[in-house]
């Protein structure tokens, strides 16, 4: 996605290892065959408990995580896995286009979010980016984050006092929302691709940080924390 | 707590319990050979307590309509044994004491268990309710009010047994009465908690009854929409374009239904853009148009012109582009509106594509200029992007009125 079309791995480079988490066996089989030759699928899971167990055991480069799962959803998987392996890279792969779902998995620690309608080369590129520690923002996620930080979002509102986006970060997000790949964003803004990644990482961090603050705020309002 | 609605029902058990404990203190101070007065007071208090509890329970049962047979049977036996204990209490102070303690304790225990069951109905296990589990959000006071009746009830019942053994030791004169009484007490001990547990199990068994109604709604919707579409797809299996079109239409309508909205409405800028994207998808089979919006604005005249221009841009992208068409709409907090239509095609040279030139010039650039906006076309190796901008000029376009919103897209 951010690195354009990369149908095949560079020769000699080890394939990234992936755990597939989705409650639809048909979908897992589809993704598995699509990704054959591009990644090494080391585990599959259909519910929250199995996803946490499999991920911790297989320790893959990337977890491909469905947002909607029986037993607590993708957020529960992220919480369970990141508590034990804080460095685990997780890419949310979902059909959901509800902002609260998407923002929730990003807040819970997913390094990226792509729609299930994504084409195979772009999915492979996204997996490689996330495996390398780069966040992956789809146009839709960029739109949601812009909306969340504008203070207009009804459900997924991010507290604007904590961290607001810099004008440059907004520019980057707008271009991603318009469908530009990271390299094209860099060209358009006349900055280096590395700088684009830095901006996107910063946006991701702000989205995740403000969630913690808001959670504390929410908790204290309800008298759970003094 | 709805104490305003039925204050007496709530105060009676309290008063009775208080009187009962005063009487208990008197009886204990007076010793085994004390007078009959404390017992009489105590017996009366116990009776009062039972009557209050019975009234409360009966009202609850009448309202809830839950297992009335079991409830009435237990209530009946409680009333009978209470009356009998009252009579006994007037003559045999130990039996009275034990009866009062036993009945009072049972009542408290049942009440505590029922409260726990009510909490369990609110999707918590009784243990979570007591310990303040993750979803409990309970205060210490709430927890105390749950535990107190249980502890007091159990304590009272233990005391009742102790007093009972004292009675059997000291007054062997009436063995049969003592045995009968012990049996009655045991029955109450077992029946009370059993009834409470049964009720809670009943309530839990009844709870999922609410879900099937939702499931019926979902099933009805799936039947009307998804199943129909699937059968259409099967019939058109030989026509990949038609299949893609059908599945895309169904996906859109299912998404809209899941998000709780109807098909996109044309009363706002974002809604109108979504609607137009769907229409273009249907016009140009096989095209996928992904729309991302940030903010929204009412569909005034300039915005409507922008949507019509966007329609033309989407058609162009669908015909000449490659991969999904991306549409991004942003309404800035200040009111400025921007709309981008982008495709990943090889781009088209405006000068070379004669057919499209007129459409682009008139339907996109001209239309935007007419309402005070701009249209820019950026076509290159990375694809083509048409950027439509409406600056914040509220007067723009308001001069020409009466034009219908669904006028022909090319003049």
Image: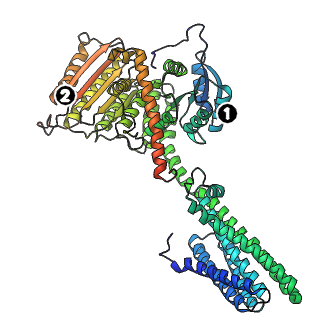
User: Outermost residue, left direction?
Assistant: B399
Q: Residue furthest top?
A: A11
In this view, B112 is above or below A52: below
| Residue B143 can be seen, yes or no | yes
The answer to whether residue B109 of the structure is visible from this angle is: no
Between B229 and A14, the residue placed more toward the observer is A14
Q: Residue at x 51, y 77 (%)?
A: B6
Quarter of the view holding residue B182: bottom right
**Callout 1–callout 2 Cβ contact below 8 Å:** no
The residue closer to the viewer here, A173 or B317, is A173
- Identified at 70% across, 82% down, the residue is B24
Front residue of this view, candidates A18 and A212: A212
Kindly identify which chain the residue marked by label 1 belongs to: A
Q: Chain of mark 2?
A: B
Circle 2 Cα neighbour tier, 10 Å, few/some/many (<14 / 14–19 / ≥20): many
Residue A53 circle label: 1
Dot 1 alpha-carbon crowd within 10 angstroms: few under 14, some 14 to 19, many 20 or more: some
Q: Share a chain, discs 1 and 2?
A: no
Given residues A151 and B165, the one toward you in this image is B165
Can you give x and y, in whole percent of width and height, for residue B287 in the image? Answer: 40, 24
Q: Which residue is mark 2?
A: B373
- Quadrant of the image containing the C terminus of chain B: top left
In this rendering, the answer to whether B388 lies above or below B161 is above
Count of labels in the image: 2
Q: Is residue B351 left or right of residue A67?
A: left
């Amino acid at each position: 996605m951010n690195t354009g079309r990369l149908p095949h791995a560079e020769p000699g480079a080890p394939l990234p290892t992936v755990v597939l988490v989705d409650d639809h066996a048909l979908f897992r089989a589809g993704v598995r065959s699509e990704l054959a030759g591009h990644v090494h699928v080391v585990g599959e899971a259909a519910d929250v408990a199995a996803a946490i167990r499999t991920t911790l055991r297989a320790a893959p480069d990337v977890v491909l995580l469905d947002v909607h799962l029986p037993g607590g959803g993708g957020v529960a998987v992220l919480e369970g896995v990141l508590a034990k392996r804080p460095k685990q890279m997780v890419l949310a792969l979902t059909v959901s286009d509800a902002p609260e779902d998407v923002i929730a998995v990003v807040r819970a620690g997913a390094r990226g979010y792509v729609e299930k309608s994504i084409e195979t080369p772009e999915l492979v590129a996204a997996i490689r980016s996330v495996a390398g520690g780069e966040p992956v923002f789809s146009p839709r996620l960029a739109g949601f984050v812009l909306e969340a930080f504008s203070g207009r979002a009804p459900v997924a509102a991010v507290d604007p006092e904590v961290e607001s986006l810099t004008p440059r970060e907004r520019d980057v997000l707008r271009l991603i929302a318009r469908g530009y790949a990271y390299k094209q964003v860099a060209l358009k803004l006349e900055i280096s691709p590395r700088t684009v990644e830095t901006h996107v990482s910063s946006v991701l961090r702000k989205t995740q940080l403000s969630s913690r603050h808001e959670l504390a705020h929410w908790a204290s309002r309800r008298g759970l924390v003094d | 707590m709805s104490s305003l609605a039925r204050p007496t029902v709530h105060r009676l058990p309290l008063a009775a319990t208080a009187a009962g404990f005063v009487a208990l203190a008197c009886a204990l101070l007076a010793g085994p050979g004390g007078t009959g007065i404390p017992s009489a007071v105590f017996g009366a208090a116990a009776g009062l307590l039972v009557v209050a509890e019975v009234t409360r329970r009966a009202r609850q049962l009448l309202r809830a309509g839950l297992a009335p047979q079991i409830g009435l049977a237990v209530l009946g036996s409680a009333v009978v044994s209470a009356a009998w204990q009252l009579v006994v209490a007037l003559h045999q102070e130990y039996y009275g004491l034990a009866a009062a303690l036993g009945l009072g304790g049972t009542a408290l225990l049942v009440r505590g268990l029922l409260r726990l069951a009510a909490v369990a109905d609110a999707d918590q296990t009784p243990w979570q309710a007591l310990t303040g589990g993750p979803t409990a959000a309970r205060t210490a006071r709430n927890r105390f009010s749950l535990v107190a009746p249980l502890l007091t009830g159990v304590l009272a019942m233990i005391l009742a047994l102790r007093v009972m053994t004292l009675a059997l030791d000291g007054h062997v004169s009436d063995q049969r009465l003592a045995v009968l009484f012990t049996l009655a007490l045991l029955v109450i001990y077992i029946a009370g908690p059993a009834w409470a547990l049964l009720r809670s199990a009943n309530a839990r068994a009844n709870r999922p009854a609410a879900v099937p109604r939702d499931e019926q709604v979902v099933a009805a919707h799936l039947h009307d929409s998804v199943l129909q579409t699937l059968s259409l797809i099967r019939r058109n299996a030989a026509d990949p374009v038609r299949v893609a079109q059908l599945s895309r239409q169904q996906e859109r309508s299912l998404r809209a239904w899941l998000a709780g909205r109807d098909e996109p409405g044309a009363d706002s800028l974002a809604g109108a853009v979504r609607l137009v994207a769907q229409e273009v998808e249907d016009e140009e089979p096989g095209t996928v148009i992904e729309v991302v919006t940030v903010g929204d604005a009412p569909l005034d005249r300039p915005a409507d012109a922008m949507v019509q221009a966007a329609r033309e841009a989407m058609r162009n992208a669908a015909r000449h582009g490659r991969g999904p068409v991306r549409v991004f709409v942003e309404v800035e907090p200040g009111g400025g509106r921007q709309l981008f239509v982008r495709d990943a095609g090889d781009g088209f040279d405006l000068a070379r594509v004669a057919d499209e030139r007129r459409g682009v010039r008139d339907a996109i650039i001209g239309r935007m200029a007419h309402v005070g906006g701009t249209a820019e076309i950026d076509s290159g190796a990375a694809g083509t992007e048409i950027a439509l901008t409406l600056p914040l000029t509220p007067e723009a376009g308001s001069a020409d009125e009466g034009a219908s919103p669904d006028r022909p897209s090319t003049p």
